[in-house]
Amino acid sequence: MNDRIFSKFFVPELGRARAIAHRYANVAGIWLVTLAVFAAQGCNRSHEEVQAQRMVARVKEEFLHAWRNYERYAWGHDALRPLSKTPHDWYGQSLLMTPVDALDTLILMNLDADVAKTKELIVRDLSFDRDIYVKNFEITIRLLGGLLSGYQLTNDQRLLKLAEDLGNRLLPAFNSPTGLPYVYVNLRTGQVRDPVTKQIKTVGRIGAVGADVTVRVPMSPLQSVRVAGRQTWLTATKIVDVVRGLLTREVSVKQLGGPIAITRASVAAAQSGLESLFLLVALLSVNVAVLNLLPIPILDGGQILLNIAEAAKGSPFSARTREYILRFGLVAILLIFALSTFNDVRDFLARLFA
């Protein structure tokens, strides 16, 4: 009787208890494995963090070793000659290459005292109004890039003002037949030197200049109008300089671009986005406005010249004379158009069969 009761009531309960215990054991096992995995990951992560901190400390130590020696032996100059412990200026006069180049690193390393000292040196002593030829590539990546990154990290408008001044002084380097920059540009006169960047040894430098050096600065409506007006004036003066250069043969007529060049520029601008497209439209508008004032009879500038001539003469020109003058102006415009189109076709064929 007792065996039957035990078999009837206790054996099933014992089986269920074993099943429950087995399930809990599985769950506990899973949790233990998970805990072990996370513990191992935590140990690894802790080890990696320790290694990373050691690397950070080592990098900072090496940087400070170089920086303190620059301060000691070459402060205010472009660079330090480490073996002779003497200063060196790339172009015979200092452009503060090392301080500008190192400013963002000083900021990222939280070296506040060095940041303040270096920034004060830059805003006090750095000037680009110098009659020297500089390498467009090196000045762009070290000075222009350094000033812009310094501005982005500090929001110091003085750094942005220096960057804007330098950028405007480098722009003439791009007034080339291909649009690729000349190797050297004079910071004061804007004159260029050496062939356009084509050589194999300098091809790698082309990609260093582009949209990457663009900085967005919030402005009020009044500031925007003022900056736009100044930029329009600068663009207009550069167009006038190009026209003057064409007349004095300082600028080759091969640099004239026509409808194909404008189309290619429009496609490239559209692919870059609306902002680039609007900028191109603005640039073309300024070009048209300035060129329309040239003293060619069929243009507004020519009409103004005719009116002045008639006022000086005291009487209007005859209809036949005006017709001849306008025909002359039309022929001049057609010749310019034909020349620019010829340049377009020549460049297109050169690209096609290059």
Image: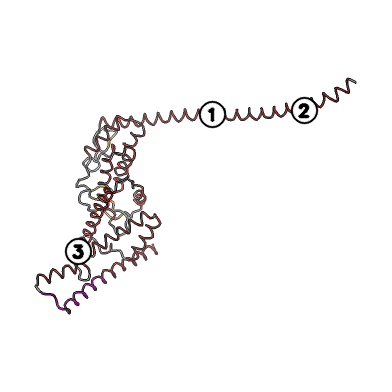
Q: Position of residue 165 (x, y in %)?
A: 25, 46
- Give me the residue at 59% from left, 30% from top: 37
Q: Position of residue 17 (x, y in %)?
A: 76, 25
Q: Is residue 267 left or right of residue 81?
A: right
Secondary structure at badge 3 equals helix
Res 348 quadrant in image: bottom left
Q: Earlier in the sequence, mark 3 or mark 2?
A: 2
Q: Earlier in the sequence, mark 1 or mark 3?
A: 1
Look at the numbered discs 3 and 2 and tell me whether their residues touch, using CB distance below 8 Å. no
Res 69 quadrant in image: top left
Return the mark for residue 247. 3
Residues in magenta, as a range:
315-333
Q: Position of residue 222 (x, y in %)?
A: 26, 48
- Give me the residue at 54% from left, 28% from top: 42
The residue closer to the viewer here, 180 or 291, is 291
- In front: mark 1 or mark 3? 1
Secondary structure at badge 2 equals helix
> Can residue 332 be found in the magenta stretch?
yes
Q: Residues within 10 Å of mark 3 (few under 14, many from 20)?
A: few
Q: Position of residue 339 (x, y in %)?
A: 28, 68
Q: How is the image coloured?
A: secondary structure
What is the distance, in whole Å, between disc 1 and disc 3 at their CAs? 74 Å
> Can residue 166 be found in the magenta stretch?
no
**Which residue position holds label 1?**
42
Residue furthest right as drawn: 1
- In front: mark 3 or mark 2? 2
**Which residue position holds label 2?**
16
- Residue type at tag 3: Leu
- Residue type at tag 2: Arg
Main structural element of the magenta stretch: helix, strand or loop?
A: helix
- In front: mark 2 or mark 1? 2
What is the distance, in whole Å, between disc 3 and disc 2 at their CAs? 105 Å
